[in-house]
Image: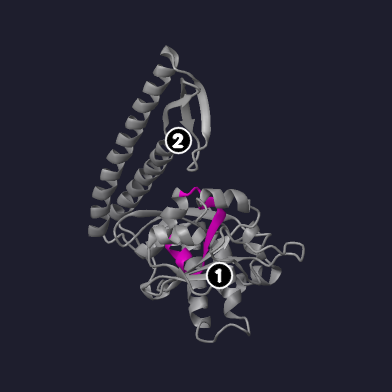
C-alpha cells in the first residue's frame, strides 16, 4: 500500500462531504414525492397529499385560503429542494473531474452504481459488502491505496442483515426486489438461475445475496419479490451480523463517491487469515487471502490507531481471534 498525497486526501475529504450533502438533499427531495394536488370528492375540492406509488394518500381539508397556502408552500419547497439537489449534483460532476485527474478513482463503476442504488433505496444499513470489494472502503478510510493485484475481483457478496424486516425492505425496493435494484445500476443484470442467489450482468460481474445460517424455525426463504434473488445461507458468517461495521466513502472509476458498509477492518483481517488456513479453502485462493489479511492488518496498525487489536472483538469465534499471532498484531 501507499499513502495518499495531501492533495489527494483533501479532495477525498471534499468528495465525502459533498456526497453527504447530496445524500441529505436527495432525501429532502424525496419527502416531496407523490405530490400534492386538488382532488374532487362529492362535488367539493379537497387538498390531497400523495403517500405512495399506488395512489394512496391523505385529504388535508377542503379548498380554502389555508389549504391554498399549504399547497403553495409545498410547491415552493419542492422547487427549492430540487434546485438545491441540482446545484450539488453539478458540484459533484466537477469534483469527479478533479478526482479522476488525481487518480482517486478506485472502485469499479458497477459496484459504485449498485451501492448508490442501495443507498438511494434507504437500504444502506441492511446490506454489508463482504470479501475483496470491502478493501476499497478500508483504503478510503485509512487514506491509502492497496496494490491493485489485491483488489481485482469479478464479484461482490452482499450480506443481508436478517434482523431487518423483509416486508419493510420489499417496500423500500418498490416491489421489484434486489434484482430490480441491480437493474437500475445496470440493465443487463439477470438471475443466473430462477430462484437462485446469484445475478450477473453482460460483463459477467456477479452479485451474490447471502445470509448466515438460520435456525430450523426460520424456514421461509429470504427474498424481496416473486422473481428476485433468494439468499443463500453461508456457514461461518454468524459472526458478521454482530461484528462492528465501518462506513466509508470511496471514489469510483468515474470519480464519483459511493458509500460502503463493511465489516470492521480488524474483523476482516482476522477472518481472512483464518480462511487462508481452512482445509476446504481452494489452494489457489489461500495465498491471496493471507496477503489481503496482512495488508488490512498493517493498514489498521499504521493508519487507523483508533482501532486497537487489543480490544477483543467478542462476536468473532475464538479460532478467528487467535489469528492475531499469524498477522503479528
328 horizontally vs 66: left or right: right
**Residue where numbered disc 1 is placed:** 197
**Residue where numbered disc 2 is placed:** 31
- Give above or below for 286 relative to 16: below
Residue at left offset 44%, top offset 49%: 120
Which of the image's four quarters has the C terminus? bottom right
Magenta span includes 284: no
Label 1 sits on a secondary structure element that is: loop
Q: Nearer the viewer, residue 314 or 58?
A: 58
- Give above or below for 77 relative to 174: above
Q: Residues within 10 Å of mark 2 (few under 14, many from 20)?
A: few
* Residue 199 coordinates in the image, percent (x, y): 48, 70
Mark positioned earlier in the residue sequence (2 or 1)? 2
Residue at left offset 30%, top offset 53%: 6
* Residue 209 coordinates in the image, percent (x, y): 55, 66
Please state the extent of the stretch shown in magenta in the rendering: 121-137
In this view, which residue lies farthest toward the right? Answer: 217
Residue at left offset 51%, top offset 76%: 289
- Give above or below for 124 relative to 27: below
Amino acid at each position: 500500500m501507499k499513502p495518499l498525497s495531501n492533495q489527494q486526501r483533501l479532495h477525498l475529504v471534499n468528495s465525502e462531504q459533498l456526497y453527504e450533502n447530496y445524500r441529505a438533499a436527495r432525501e429532502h427531495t424525496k419527502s416531496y414525492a407523490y405530490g400534492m394536488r386538488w382532488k374532487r370528492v362529492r362535488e367539493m375540492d379537497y387538498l390531497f397529499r400523495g403517500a405512495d406509488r399506488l395512489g394512496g394518500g391523505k385529504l388535508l381539508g377542503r379548498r380554502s385560503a389555508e389549504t391554498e397556502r399549504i399547497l403553495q408552500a409545498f410547491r415552493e419547497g419542492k422547487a427549492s429542494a430540487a434546485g438545491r439537489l441540482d446545484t450539488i449534483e453539478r458540484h459533484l460532476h466537477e469534483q469527479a473531474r478533479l478526482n479522476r485527474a488525481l487518480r482517486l478513482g478506485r472502485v469499479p463503476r458497477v459496484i459504485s452504481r449498485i451501492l448508490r442504488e442501495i443507498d438511494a433505496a434507504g437500504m444502506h444499513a441492511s446490506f454489508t459488502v463482504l470479501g475483496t470489494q470491502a478493501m476499497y472502503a478500508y483504503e478510503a478510510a485509512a487514506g491509502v491505496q492497496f496494490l491493485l493485484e489485491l483488489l481485482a475481483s469479478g464479484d461482490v457478496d452482499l450480506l443481508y442483515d436478517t434482523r431487518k424486516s423483509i416486508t419493510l425492505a420489499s417496500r423500500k425496493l418498490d416491489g421489484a426486489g434486489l434484482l430490480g435494484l441491480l437493474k437500475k445500476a445496470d440493465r443487463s443484470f439477470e438471475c443466473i438461475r430462477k430462484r437462485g442467489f446469484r445475478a450477473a450482468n453482460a460483463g459477467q460481474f456477479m452479485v451474490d445475496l447471502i445470509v448466515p445460517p438460520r435456525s430450523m424455525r426460520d424456514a421461509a426463504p429470504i427474498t424481496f419479490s416473486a422473481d428476485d434473488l433468494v439468499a443463500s445461507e453461508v456457514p461461518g458468517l454468524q459472526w458478521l451480523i454482530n461484528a462492528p461495521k465501518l462506513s466509508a466513502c470511496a471514489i469510483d472509476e468515474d470519480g464519483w463517491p459511493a458509500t460502503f458498509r463493511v465489516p470492521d477492518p480488524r474483523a476482516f483481517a482476522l477472518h481472512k487469515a483464518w480462511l487462508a488456513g481452512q482445509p476446504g479453502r481452494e489452494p489457489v485462493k489461500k495465498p491471496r487471502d493471507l496477503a489481503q489479511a496482512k495488508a488490512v492488518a498493517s493498514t489498521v496498525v499504521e493508519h487507523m490507531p483508533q482501532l486497537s487489536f487489543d480490544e477483543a472483538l467478542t462476536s468473532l469465534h475464538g479460532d478467528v481471534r487467535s489469528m492475531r499471532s499469524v498477522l503479528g498484531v
